Every structure is written in C-alpha cells, then in structure tokens.
Image (tube, rainbow, N blue to C red):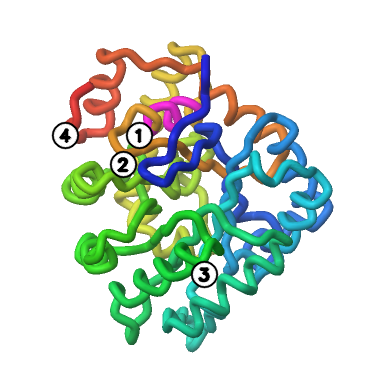
Amino acid sequence: MNNTIAIGKTGLKAFKLGFGAGVVGNSMMYSKVDDTLSRQLIRTALEKGINFIDTAFLYGMGHSEELIGEAIRDYGGREHLVISTKASSNPQFNQGHLEVDNSAAALRKAVDDSLMRLQTDYVDIFFLHFPDSRTPLAEAADTLAELKKSGKIKAIGASNLSFEQLQAFNANKHLDVLQAEYSLLVRHAEADVIPYCLEHEISLIPFFPLASGLLAGKYKKDDVFNDTSRMNNPLFQKEAFLANLERVDRFKAFAKDKGADPAQIALAWLLTRPAVDLIIPGATKPDQIESNLQTLGVRLTSDELKQLDILFNQDNLFTE
C-alpha cells in the first residue's frame, strides 16, 4: 500500500507517519535523551523510510535543529525529505511565562537562523510556534508569505492558536498547515477548527496525539506527576485523571481484541480523521519508532470507529 500522502495544498508529499523530534536535543525537558540517543532516533526514522521530520527552535533552543541538520548532511537526499520547524523568535521565559517575538524582523531572523542550523537553503514548512501579544497575526502571516515567495520556506504553518486566532492568522489566506491538539481524549477541534481547515484546504497535524501518554496506557491511578506539562493539564487533574484511566482500561481491552497496542490504535484513529493528512508521533527509544510504524497496518472499520466514539463518550461529528 502506498503510504505517501499529499499535504493539503502545499504541493509537498510525505510518508503519512512522520517523526516528531520534540525530544531530540531537548535535554531541558528530556534529561535522559542525550545527543547520542538523539542522533540514533533521527537515524532510525530515516532508515525506516520516514521522510517527514518536525522540530522547533524551542526544542533545546536550536540544538534539535542542529542535530537534524547534521543528520540531513550525513544522510543526504535532502530533496526527498520534508523538514518542518517552528519559531517565535528567541523565546524568553519571564517568571515562568514564555515571551515571544513575531515581528517581521524577528521572524526573518528566525528563518535564517533555522536554515543555518538545519544546514539547508529552504524549510519545507515553517510554523509560527506561538502568537505574541504585540504582532497582529495577519501581519505575521504576511511576513511568512514574503519568505515563502523568496523560496526560503515552501509552506506556511501555525501552531498553538485558538479558533479566533486561527481565523486572524488566515485573514489573507496564507495558512497551509495547522498544528493543533487532537486525540481521542481531546476533540474540541472537531467543533470549529476541523470544519474551518476543510473549508480552506488547510492540513491539520495533531500534536499530543497520545494525550501526553494517557492513550498509550502506561499510567496508574497512584502515579504522581512533577512535570509542569502534566501538572497543568486538565486531563491529569485528579477526578478527570481517574475517569480517563477507566476509559483507557477499556480502550486497552479494545486494542487487545484488535491485536494492536493502544498507541497504535490511537494513532490509526487519527489517520481516519478529516483534514489530517499525516501524524508525527515522537519517540524516546528507537523501538518506539518501529512500533509507531506498525500503526500503518491497523485498519479500523466503521463499526470499530463507532465503538471508540462510545468508549470515549464523544459525539461522532464526522461519520465515516
């Protein structure tokens, strides 16, 4: 089966399961992932035929891009790879809050700096990583459109936008690809974001496709979380967390009957969703990349999709 997919209206084509490189070079958040392991993860993804790699300046403050640039140089075949990166130029943390700069000058510099670290003369998809409080989103999109016209980027992306911000960013119809949170457990994108993406031919790439690990079935009710990403996540607050664990226990039984891992089912489900052309699960071990690839062999029937909607107590806004 051909697992290459066209990415929306970008003109780009890629393997429908990419590699989310959030851990690569990102020792600030993943202390157990050193450069040796990071390089091994990139190499494994490339050797397994994955040609879409997603990174960001924020992942190690540029170090993830540097390691990926090294890998691209050593691996070769840049023209067969689809590389995406994200920036809100040189984010700073002020009293725990992320401060970003999306001014025209800052975005132009961010793109040039990414090109240097990635050792390439173009980025396939460049994402505005976060909105700022000063730059109108339409102006930021216009800046990226100028960079697209110059050839430095091939497609324009945005991430971490509310629905209202999405509309503002796309006021002049520049947006090609959106990254937004979407999973079996987090489906608010179905109410407005996905219909908008379909209407405007915007490709949706989900982030947190496994709901920060919940859908992989690896947590227990007495687990304690010290990382801010989970401590501040509504899915992990006590009552919600316990309710989600009950759902996941039933989900694990569903996956077992299907002969697949829960993570593979959750990823396969995303590939059935409207506007989702490809997914970019991450990995902290090479064998997780191989396991993710097995997702492409999972086929969910219409009846099974309905079972999953019932299991997660969601109205199925998109019937198959």
- Mark 4 or mark 2, which is nearer to you? 4
Query: Is residue 265 inside the magenta stretch?
Result: yes
Residue annotated with mark 3: 87
> Are discs 3 and 2 less than 8 Å apart at CB?
no
User: What residue would you read off at disc 4?
Assistant: 317
Q: Is residue 194 above or below residue 308?
A: below
Check the image and report above or below for 161 versus 47.
below
Find the magenta span and give its range. Answer: 264-270
* Residue annotated with mark 2: 243
Q: Which is nearer the eye, 221 or 60?
A: 60
| Labelled pair 4, 3 in contact (Cβ < 8 Å) | no
Q: Amino acid at mark 2?
A: Ala
Q: Are marks 2 and 1 in contact (CB under 8 Å)?
A: yes
Q: Which residue is mark 1?
A: 246
Indicate the amino acid at tag 3: Ala
Crowd rating for badge 2 (residues with CA inside 10 Å; few <14, some 14–19, many 20+): some
Q: Nearer the viewer, mark 4 or mark 3?
A: 3
